[in-house]
Image: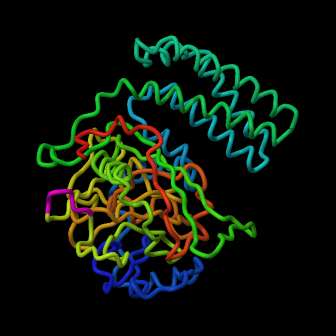
Amino acid sequence: MWASLSSPISRPAVHPASGVRMGIENQPTHAHRFSAAALAAVLMLSPLQLPLVPPGLSGAVQARELASGSGSRVNKDPNSLLRLGLPAQPAPLREVQLKLEEAGDSITRLLLTNANQAVNTAKKTLDSKSSAILKAVPAAESARGEELLASITREVSELQQAISTNNAADSQAASERVLKDVTKLEELIAGTFSQPAPPAEFKELPWLKGRAQVAFELKRPNGKFDVDGKLYDKLELTSIVDGYTAPITAGNFIDLVQKGFYNGMSVQRSDGFVVQTGDPTAEGKGATKNGYVPEGSSSVRKIPLEVYVTGDKKPLYSTTFDDDGRGGYASALPFNAYGALGMAREEYDADSASSQWFWLLFDSDLTPAGKNLLDGRYSCFGYTVDGARFLSDVKEGDVIVSAKVVSGYENLQNAKP
């Protein structure tokens, strides 16, 4: 199990995808980068290696397919994963989404014949199932739903036309346009979902109903960022935080962002696998407690481990997938994308998270489909949808100048000054 992300800095850091101990957390001054082959060799010797799928769990095989979204290939698209995490979606719209995503993937690999076949299937579904799709739209938003569905239908035809001219660039642009409208329609339908409040024992904690968007700005003191050979004075990233699958984890994060907790805080760990921050005691400003202490309190506010099995109706609390007897099952919001947001916690205490979190520098060679050992052990609460590539040059000591909630703050429940 990945250990000690938020434990005292003298404890060993652990590779997130494998559970391999990588050294002392307060010592790395440069990225620990391993090739897939080197990591495989370490895995063979690691006493912490866990069984990936318990014998006889045929359901886990099917669940892993849902997590990968593309058979043996990992679904690394944060926008696709966010769409798949939306509740209350009608089956025909899901089919349209998946076929259009399949087409987009084929376009990027210049397999335009395959893309055309997928788009044709999506079009047939739209033509035959439009009434079923519109039926799922909230009654108060029916006009908007009809508008979006008409736009999707038109854009599918435009995508077909672009593919027929063998123009990959135009096809890719058309694919992105139609999928944006699919996202808007699915988000509209998700508004019909009656999201339950978290369990009563956590009633004092903030939680997020739906989703919110956070914008980050990072700077390097007395230096520039070098990303793919291009220099930047600052980095700007945007993340979507998901309360459907991790309401308390997402709510805690949005609450801290809104309070300005992370503004001016430095990156405290960057080892090639994660970019992590959130420990106020590492800032050298006199903080004595590792976590967020609410005003008027002397204790750190801690939140429970919150993980969600695909197909369940609510998250699991204070337990891992393994401890719940479902090791190897798919997570509703998997650690499948570069820049996925995860909550750090201590190794042996499931309910020890507070303010430390990380961006995962996902590598599909190191965490293949259905074998991501973070899922079900740590809370994934969102994805970076813009600027994720910038994380490749973020180093310890770089500063989060600002983290701002740009939309969705009204979805935060139990917010306190």
Left/right of residue 24 with respect to residue 33 in the rendered view: left
Total marks in image: 0
Left/right of residue 27 with respect to residue 168 in the rendered view: left
The furthest residue to the right: 165
Check the image and report above or below for 243 versus 223: above
Left/right of residue 149 with respect to residue 406 in the rendered view: right
Where is residue 162 shown, x and y percent of the image? Answer: 81, 32
Which residue appears at 43% of the width and 88% of the height? 27
Which residue appears at 56% of the width and 49% of the height? 385
Along the viewing direction, whichever of 227 and 296 lies nearer the viewer: 296
> Which quadrant of the structure image shows residue 107?
top right
Left/right of residue 286 with respect to residue 171 in the rendered view: left
Which residue appears at 75% of the width and 40% of the height? 172
Where is residue 39 shown, x and y percent of the image? Answer: 52, 80
Where is residue 251 shown, x and y percent of the image? Answer: 31, 47
Q: Which residues are magenta?
A: 292-297
Magenta segment, prevailing SS (helix, strand or loop): loop
Residue 366 lies in the magenta-colored region: no
- How are the colours assigned in the image? rainbow
The furthest residue to the left: 201
Where is residue 164 shown, x and y percent of the image? Answer: 84, 31
Along the viewing direction, whichever of 405 and 81 lies nearer the viewer: 405
Check the image and report above or below for 99 versus 357: above
Q: Quadrant of the N terminus?
A: bottom left
Check the image and report above or below for 188 versus 7: above
